Amino acid sequence: MISSLTGTVNFKTLQGVEVQVGQIGYWVVVSTRLIADLEIGEKTTFYTDLIVGEKLLELYGFSSRQEIKIFRMLTSVSGVGPRTALQIFNAHDGQVIEEAIDKADVAFFQSIKGIGKKTAQRLIVDLRSTLDQVRFQEEKEFENKEPTVYQALVQLGFSKEEIRLVIDKIDEAADDEEKIAQALKLLSGND
């Protein structure tokens, strides 16, 4: 499976872009928001999901691993195919979509062409539990990666989301005291 592509944008239309990787050009279906941000000749990386169907073989591309994760979650819901999921990304970025799921915002999903009230409700019900499981797993990974730093920051009152944003940025070779100091510096915005 192709999980990411790094190459040069050769050609673009309203439906996607051709990315030249070595001597091969890959057609990648991307959101209209992402197409607007790309320039021909620009080097870029797409995080991708290959969709294989009976009469379908399409590579969907996104600008972050988080967005590809949300895309996969969306397409896991009954009645939501890759084109419908892409319609959601045409209107909003991954973080906004995740917030709408958290807030159980049915109107947010209904505003997308092709999604009715029942599908919007099903999206929220199915994805809230999936999102909670993913967050729990990510939290455990961060806690296991730097347990001393994680616990220290929790005890100092930082949210799990704030901790998640800085834990990957600290120097793994440093001792625990230095790691905590680095994390505090990042959290205070004095990086």
Image: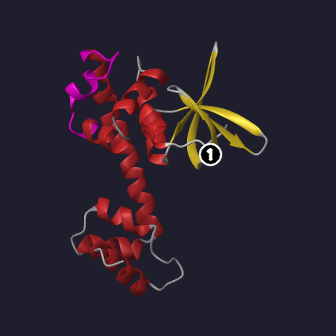
Magenta stretch encompasses residue 106: yes
Q: Looking at the image, can residue 76 be seen?
A: no
Residue 52: percent from the left, percent from the top?
Answer: 62, 23
Residue 77: percent from the left, percent from the top?
Answer: 41, 24
Identify the residue at image location x=24%, y=68%.
158
Q: Looking at the image, can residue 102 be seen?
A: yes
Identify the residue at image location x=32%, y=41%.
98
For this orientation, the residue located farthest to the right is 23
Identify the residue at image location x=45%, y=75%.
170
Is residue 147 shown above or below 15? below
Residue 50: percent from the left, percent from the top?
Answer: 61, 31
Identify the residue at image location x=28%, y=29%.
124
- Stretch in magenta: 101-117
Is residue 112 shown above or below 73? above
How are the colours assigned in the image? secondary structure
* Residue 12 placement, left or right of 166: right
Amino acid type shown at disc 1: Gly
Magenta stretch encompasses residue 14: no
Quarter of the rendering containing residue 121: top left
For this orientation, the residue located farthest to the top is 55
Please tell me how many numbered marks the rendered image carries.
1
* Residue 165 placement, left or right of 44: left
Instruction: Tell which of 141 and 32 is nearer to you.
Output: 32
Look at mark 1 in the image and give the residue it sits on: 41
* Residue 88 placement, left or right of 102: right
Q: Residues within 10 Å of mark 1 (few under 14, many from 20)?
A: few
Q: Secondary structure at mark 1?
A: loop
The quarter of the picture where the N terminus appears is: top right
The quarter of the picture where the C terminus appears is: bottom left
Residue 185: percent from the left, percent from the top?
Answer: 33, 79
Is residue 32 shown above or below 37? above
